Amino acid sequence: MEGDFCRDAALALGCVGLTAIKVPEAEAALRGKSLTEKTIAAAADAARTAADPQPDMRGSAEYKRTLVAALVKRAIAAAARRARGEKVEVSHLYA
């Protein structure tokens, strides 16, 4: 993704807190910057920190925070590809 530039970003998390969570720190990590491994990791880390999941039979809170970071990275990659004009199919399969 070197060379991709993020003009604007909006990030909200669902189902990892009592309400939807906006993540301005993740948005700021991306907005106006090139999409590098470092900027994407910073956004994913900010999302991970903002998440406030409840542990349940589906997983621990720590597991769910780790999943948030991984899914944010995937979402950024899909958004970058779409911005380049590619048709990108995404799924809810996490494996």
Image (spheres, rainbow, N blue to C red):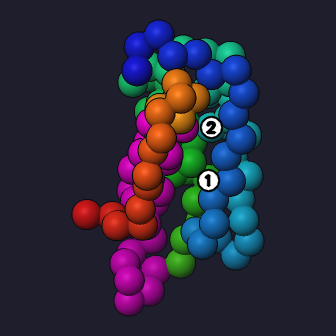
Q: Which residue is mark 2?
A: 26
Q: Residues within 10 Å of mark 2 (few under 14, many from 20)?
A: many
* Residue nearer the viewer, 20 or 61: 20
Quadrant that contains the C terminus: bottom left
Q: Residue at x 47, y 10 (%)?
A: 3
Q: Position of residue 32 (x, y in %)?
A: 68, 16
Q: Residue furthest left?
A: 95
Whether 28 is drawn above or below 21: the answer is: above
Magenta highlight on residue 84: no
Q: Residue furthest top?
A: 3
Image quarter for residue 14? bottom right
Q: Amino acid at mark 2?
A: Ala
Q: Position of residue 35 (x, y in %)?
A: 50, 21
Q: Secondary structure at mark 1?
A: helix
Q: Residue at x 53, y 29 (%)?
A: 85
Q: Residue at x 73, y 52 (%)?
A: 22
Whether 76 is drawn above or below 7: the answer is: below
Whether 62 is drawn above or below 41: the answer is: below
**Of the numbered discs in the image, which one, if any, rests on residue 50?**
1
Instruction: State which region is magenta.
Output: 55-80
Q: Secondary structure at mark 2?
A: helix
* Residue nearer the viewer, 89 or 59: 89
* Magenta segment main secondary structure: helix
Q: Residues within 10 Å of mark 1 (few under 14, many from 20)?
A: many
Image quarter for residue 83? top right
Residue 94 visible, this orientation: yes
